[in-house]
Amino acid sequence: MVTTNDRTRRLIDRRRVLKAGAGVLALPLAGAPVRAAEARRGGTLTVVTQGEPRTLVPLFDTNTNTRNISTKVTEGLLTYSADFTPRPQLATAWNVSADGLEYAFTLRPGVKWHDGADFTSADVQFSLQALQKVGPRGRISFANLARVETPDALTAVVKLSKPTPYFLKALSAAESPILPRHAYQGDNLDSSANNNAPIGTGPFIFDEWKRGSHISLRRNPQYWRPERPYLDRVVVKFVADPAAASAALETGEADASGTLSLADVKRLADGGKFVVSSQRDAYLNNAAVLEFSLDNQYLAQRAVRHAIARTIDRDFIRQWIYYGYASQIRSPIPEVLSSYFDPTSFDHPFNLDEANRLLDEAGLKRGSGGIRFALKLTFIPGAAFKATAGYLRSALGRAGIRVDILDGDLGTFIKRVYYDRDFDINLNGLGLLFDPTVGVQRIYWSDGIKHPLPYVNAAHYNNPAVDGLFRQASIEPDEARRADQFRQIQKIASDDLPALPLVALETALVSNARVRDLYNSVDLTAGDFSDAWLDR
């Protein structure tokens, strides 16, 4: 199969979006797309967010805050339209061998790193191998990566040991950033200054990270896309709580935020002064997921996990905690991946009587004060997750399970869950992603027990049958057989229930009406802002 600029352009033109040579898909927040000639140059876009990233390169940590900032600075080989059609970014063309074991990428000529060095195939080679070695998802995405050959400065040939049906979807800036090889020394990847002051090829240049306050990016005057970006600067401000984010919008100190309290999102939407966009990020497919530590003596029992699932009214969470800015979830595999999605075995209805019956039958009778046993609940930082944790404490309490909530920042959360294992139930925000091998597998992958990594198998679930099915699916070129393997996985995972998906999350972004064309890729806020501009 050969994919070139011309072929990609024809595909994109049929979908009535910008030409492939422009490198982006215009998905404006509101109204009809604006012609490039009408866009205004200049100004500073200020985005306010709750929580501060631990790093600015999604190499070791794929947290949303990191991804959303890094993609303005660093780029990927490809970007994608709304239906996952790959489009050129740092690669302008690609050729896939008939056996699916070789991908030859032609790289964009004349691209410079922000420090003036030339971008070459050596950077692609370094980046993919680094992601394979240390990336929480890269170890899955590039598990079959044998080597990357660099026959010349503008050709990178990826050699795979086995067919990898999802490979071409894994090359976005947020998922697989291309990093400057010269900014890293040896194998000690985590010690590079580039992780916190990144050098990229993207539309914006890293300027400053003032800890506890903000990150500032400035326009790249040598960007390979002519006339882009329109903005002079992008500033990301950090606030301690969502109320401060709302206040920053209302006072005009900020232009946009995607981390407001959802109660404030509804209030601001009803007020008519702001543009509110609520969409599913089809690339990330974020979900709120409750994970059970199978190291716990009670949660190791399948019946107890099923009982807890029946204490939880997931529709209540969707309507009252997320104010409708979330969707029902009916399987561990996202519904948007329609070829693989199968909801028939995911049967965990809210039924408190059934929950109490299951716990009684497990021999966990109520004791003093009606308590059967106690659990420690951790949750990933965020207003909605905190509110959900409070609801879970109440819901499980009605079945006689006392829940003690452990709070903390993102670093504390990751250490507590994945390294110290100081939790019993964990409320997590996980990207189910663009393919089940990359996003869903890590929730159940037993390798995460031996090699702990953030967002990989917090439950310590170990089922050789599930591991085997995931291994088969990861290299299966036949789509019908692959779909059957994923259907089997969904049945087993729904029955064993080491993790309970609660709701599918939407990206709810509130912006000043002057902000235009903020989204320009399938991954929404992880786009590069190169088409964003500020109206009068």
Image: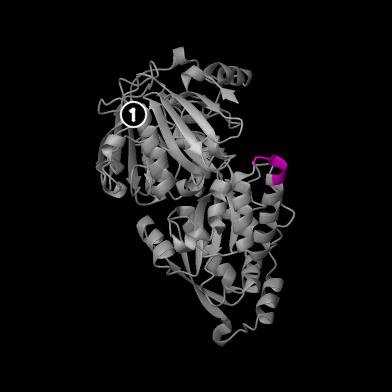
On whether residue 301 falls in the magenta region, the answer is: no
Report the residue at 67% width, 55% height from top. 490
Does 42 sit above or below residue 420?
above
Q: In this view, does 125 lie to the left or right of 215?
A: right
Q: Position of residue 473 (x, y in %)?
A: 63, 48
* Residue at which label 1 appears: 204
Quarter of the image with the C terminus in it:
top left
Toward the viewer: 515 or 173?
A: 173
- Specify the amino acid type for callout 1: Phe
- For the stretch drawn in magenta, the main secondary structure is helix
Quarter of the image with the N terminus in it:
top right
Report the residue at 36% width, 38% height from top. 126
Q: In which quarter of the image is residue 130?
A: top left
On whether residue 478 falls in the magenta region, the answer is: yes
**Extreme residue toward the bottom, this view:** 368
**Extreme residue toward the top, this view:** 37
**Tag 1 secondary structure:** strand
The answer to whether one can see residue 333 in this image is no
The answer to whether one can see residue 204 in this image is yes
Span shown in magenta = 477-481
Q: Where is residue 203 in the image (x, y as percent from the top left)?
A: 36, 26
